[in-house]
Image (cartoon, grey):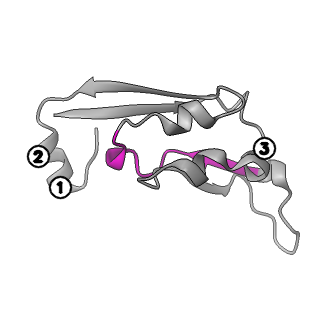
Amino acid sequence: MILMEITIDHEKCKVPAKCRKCLEVCPQAVFKMHLAKIEKYTEAEDKDWHLEPWYWPSCSGCMECVKKCPLNAIKVKARKIEGIQRLIGTGKYA
């Protein structure tokens, strides 16, 4: 089985909350933003958000995120993985 390996260069993608291009263009909704740090009783700033390919097994490899990223911070490459059916069935991804 072939799965896509998605990497995000967080040195380039420092403020994903302002851009959100990958979130908007991904047909499989692979990406998720979450707070990198949580402080009680304070409003989160744009720089406090972190982007991750949370649902990476759903990636179809369309490369729309790579094309639309203005900072060239997203890389997607195909990986052939043996025995992945067993891992997906148990919920323990490689």
Question: Relative to residue 72, is residue 29 drawn left or right?
Answer: left
Kindly identify the amino acid type of the residue bearing the numbered disc 3. Val
Rendered location of residue 63, percent (x, y): 46, 33
Earlier in the chain: of badge 3 and badge 2, it is 3
Q: Which residue is mark 1?
A: 90
Q: Which amino acid type is shown beneath numbered disc 1?
A: Thr
Circle 3/circle 1 CB separation < 8 Å: no
Characterize the local packing of mark 2: few (<14), some (14-19) or many (20 or more) Cα atoms within 10 angstroms: few
- Give the numbered dot on residue 15: 3
Q: Mark 3, mark 2: which one is toward the viewer?
A: 3
Label at residue 70? none
Q: Which residues are magenta?
A: 49-60
Q: Residue beneath label 2, please?
A: 86
Q: Quadrant of the C terminus?
A: top left
Please, is residue 8 above or below residue 20 in the view?
above
- Residue type at numbered disc 2: Arg
Q: Secondary structure at mark 3?
A: loop
| Residue shown at the point (47%, 55%) measured from the top left | 29
